[in-house]
Image (cartoon, grey):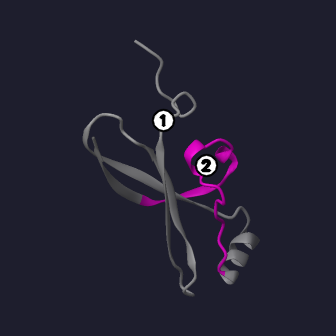
Amino acid sequence: PGTPLTPTSFAGPQIVVSVYGPDFFGNDVVRGYGAVHIPFTPGRHTRTIAMFVPESTSTLQKFTSWFTGRRPEFTDPRVVAQGEGREVTRVRSQGFVTISFNVV
């Protein structure tokens, strides 16, 4: 019946979402990252994106990032879209974002 679509075999267009918001000290920090493939078929499509945020690996790093207001972030959005190399990154689930597409 065909080859199943996996992230490595399907290279279609994606939307990468980065959500930022203020922390306790008023600094803008990352609240979550997520990505979803854009549908090809015409019509209205709704997708729910599972969001995640990178975490510090040690207790000292967690305390330092909390104290300074600088939390771990991805500098390149391709890390979120491709997932390559992300298997060694510690992340925490951070909710969902719902997005609607109107494809013509």
Residue beneath the point at 40% across and 42% down: 38
Q: Are marks 1 and 2 in contact (CB under 8 Å)?
A: no
Q: Position of residue 79 (x, y in %)?
A: 63, 49
Of residues 40 and 29, the one nearer the viewer is 40
Residue 27 position in % (x across, y down): 58, 82
Above or below — where is 4 with respect to 13? above
Residue type marked 2:
Arg
Give me the disc on residue 12. 1
Tell me if 50 is positioned left or right of 79 in this view: left
Looking at the rendered structure, the secondary structure element under dot 1 is loop
- Does residue 42 appear left or right of residue 29 in this picture? left
Quarter of the figure that contains the C terminus = top left
Q: Secondary structure at mark 2?
A: helix
Q: Report crowding for label 2: few under 14, some 14 to 19, many 20 or more residues within 10 A (C-alpha).
A: few
Between the residue at mark 1 and the residue at mark 2, the CA separation in whole angstroms equals 13 Å
Query: Who's the residue at 64% across and 59% down the image?
Result: 74
Residue drawn at the location 47% of the way across and 27% of the way down: 5
In the picture, measured across the screen, residue 69 lies left or right of residue 92, that is right
- Residue 32 among those drawn in magenta: no
Residue type at mark 1: give it: Gly
Q: Which residues are magenta?
A: 69-95
> Left or right: 49 with respect to 57?
left
Q: Nearer the viewer, residue 14 or 3?
A: 14
- In the rendered image, the quadrant that contains the N terminus is top left
On the image, numbered disc 2 is attached to which residue? 78
Residue 86 in the image: above or below residue 94: above
- Residue at far top of view: 1
Residue 46 in the image: state x and y as whole percent: 29, 48
